[in-house]
Image (cartoon, helix red, strand yellow):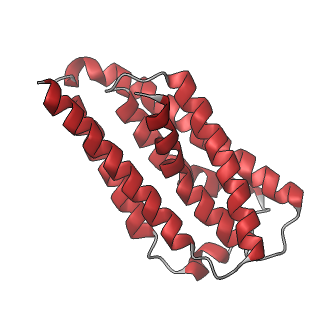
């Protein structure tokens, strides 16, 4: 998997963090240290989950190598479709909590990184530099979270829905690309 593909996966995975950050930034009551703290936690969880998933996927790959491309496609598509579905949840549900509380921060960090865990499982079925993937996903998520909070603070008129929809479509597109590459090799 190329760096460009990893970069687009990182963007896709970080879109839910971007959307959450946008929502919290729009509240206009967070301090800079609050934004850095939740951006760091989002990035940490987004980076570690693919590593955990990759370890599981690599172990399973020995048994599933004939259908690995379909598994990667299916997992990425499920994540992408879930992100698109979740984008239609009410904005009030995303803003009704205080991200400065540790329990909320850890829960949101875990919830936004579950798709990264599943993506990591799919990494176990394709050739990927996992260290590069983890670093790329972490950095992109951190930056996207900072930007989301910054944009949200400046404009309440931007809907986080579109960030999640685009992220979901990117993941589905990458899943389709994996299948097409495998089918053209056969």
Nearer to us in this view, 141 or 183? 183
Q: Quadrant of the C terminus?
A: top left
Q: Position of residue 68 (x, y in %)?
A: 23, 30
For the question of whether residue 95 can be seen, the reply is yes
Task: Say left or right for 116 vs 138.
Answer: left
Q: Is residue 60 above or below residue 16?
A: above
Q: Position of residue 5 (x, y in %)?
A: 44, 36
Task: Say left or right for 94 vs 81.
Answer: right
Nearer to us in this view, 3 or 67? 3
Task: Say left or right for 95 vs 73.
Answer: right
Task: Say left or right for 133 vs 85.
Answer: right
Q: Position of residue 184 (x, y in %)?
A: 15, 30
User: Which residue corresponds to the image point at 21% horizontal and 25% vertical from the top-left?
Assistant: 64
Residue 174 sits in which quadrant? top left
User: Which residue corresponds to the image point at 40% horizontal and 65% vertical from the top-left?
Assistant: 84
For the question of whether residue 67 can be seen, the reply is no
Q: Is residue 175 above or below residue 64?
A: below
Q: Is residue 100 above or below residue 65?
A: below
């Amino acid at each position: 998997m190329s760096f460009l593909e990893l970069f687009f996966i990182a963007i896709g995975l970080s879109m839910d963090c971007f959307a959450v950050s946008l929502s919290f930034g729009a509240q206009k009551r967070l301090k800079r240290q609050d934004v850095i703290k939740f951006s760091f936690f989002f990035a940490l969880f987004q980076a570690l989950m693919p590593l955990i998933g990759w370890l599981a996927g690599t172990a399973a790959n020995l048994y599933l190598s004939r259908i690995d491309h379909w598994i990667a496609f299916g997992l990425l598509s499920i994540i992408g479709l879930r992100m698109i579905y979740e984008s239609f949840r009410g904005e009030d549900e995303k803003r009704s909590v205080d991200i400065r509380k540790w329990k909320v921060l850890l829960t949101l960090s875990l919830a936004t990184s579950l798709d990264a865990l599943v993506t990591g499982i799919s990494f176990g079925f394709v050739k990927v530099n996992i260290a590069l993937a983890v670093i790329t996903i972490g950095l992109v998520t951190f930056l996207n979270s900072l930007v989301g909070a910054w944009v949200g603070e400046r404009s309440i008129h931007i809907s986080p829905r579109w960030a999640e929809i685009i992220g979901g479509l990117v993941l589905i597109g990458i899943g389709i690309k994996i299948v097409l590459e495998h089918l053209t090799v056969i």
